[in-house]
Amino acid sequence: MIQSSNELQTGRRQAATLALFAFALLTASCVMKKAAPPPDRYNFIEAKLSEGRGHGGSQRGDFVMHDVDVVRASSGDVETLTARKIIRNGSLEMRVNDVGQSITKIGTIVGASGGYVEKSTQTNSDGHSADLTVRVPAARLDQVMTEVKGLATTVDKEGVEVRDVTREYIDLDARLRNAQAEEAQYLLILKRAATIKDMLDVTEKLSDVRGRIEQMQREMKFLMAQIDMSSLEISLRADSDAAVAGIHWRPLRQAKIALGEMISGLADWADAVIEFLINLPLIGAWLVSIVILILIAVRILRFLWRRFGPKTSWRFPWRRSAPRNDAPTS
């Protein structure tokens, strides 16, 4: 009986000791939490972003970047992303009977195809000529080129340039979708921000992401415009050649060229004369300065010769001594 009473007291003592030990541990943990240093500037954002890292995302820097394949699969439009993106541009150099009428007809052809004239330049210095840049739907580029060539008497040059931008399009689309996913996550974090400091930090990150999104959207818009609308550069020259004995003779054109060269030569001559007359005082000043420097140099040389040279009278080599009058005569 006495033994069972002792065992009961011993068990009570052990239970009390364990309770005191647990209370001490709990108190120490509370003190350590209170003494922990305050979070830095991005701890709140990092803590919120870490909640989404177990949902298929991978961290890049301070952001959660979803995997590209996951984003593509969620779009449900795989064919659009994997379709080849081609930019086709054409060029034509041809001669026509009337440049002005050809420009009007080209504008009609381009407008009927759903395009527009982007740039038009005409010159009359060396015969009537024109350079046009038009934009037409990419699917109708070949048709428009065929119709435009029907206006020419001679097609001097024709070309089509093809550039595959599929990889560039896919990369830009993936980066844009990732940036939009970041924006959505930061909007969620902004809703859960508890302090003004956290709101300011998240707003700064959100502003940076939105800036990148706007830039990539502009790049995407420009790239799609190049893909959808092909560029066609057209060079027109007036065909005023006259065939004489099988030789293309263009006397009027050569006369215009010769007259232009003569006028240009006369203009150059007149410019040279005017420049000479304007610079004449400067030329005179240089000549006077050169003469003065030569005279000073001669005087210095004469002084040095008399001072350090042989003790004879110095004179110019071309001067001969005059004959003496007192010479004896025979």
Image (cartoon, rainbow, N blue to C red):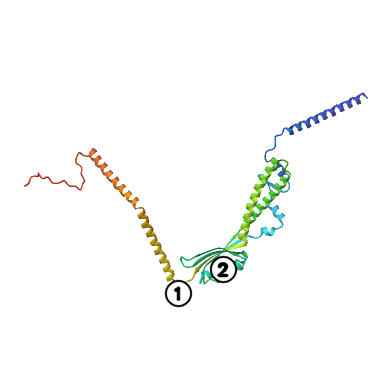
Q: CA distance from mark 2 to mark 1?
A: 28 Å
Question: In which quadrant of the rendered view does residue 85 lie?
Answer: bottom right
Task: Answer with mark 2 or mark 1, whichever residue precedes in sequence.
Answer: 2
Judge whether residue 60 can be spotted in this image. Answer: no
Q: Quadrant of residue 5?
A: top right
Q: Nearer the viewer, residue 89 or 57?
A: 89
Callout 1: SS = strand
Q: Amino acid at mark 1?
A: Ala
Q: Depth check: 22 or 310 in front?
A: 310
The residue tagged with tag 2: helix, strand or loop?
A: helix
Q: Mark 1: give few (<14), some (14-19) or many (20+) Cα within 10 Å.
A: few
Q: Residue furthest bottom?
A: 245
Left or right, 248 with respect to 149, comes to left
Quarter of the image containing the N terminus?
A: top right
Image x and y of residue 275, in percent: 37, 55
| Numbered tag placed on residue 243 in the rendering | 1
Q: For the residue marked with disc 2, what is the amino acid?
A: Ile
Residue at the spot x=30%, y=48% of the render? 288
Residue wearing tag 2: 106
Q: Is residue 288 visible?
A: yes
Dot in front, 2 or 1: 2
Residue 268 at x, y percent in the picture: 39, 59
Q: Residue at x 80, y 30 (%)?
A: 23
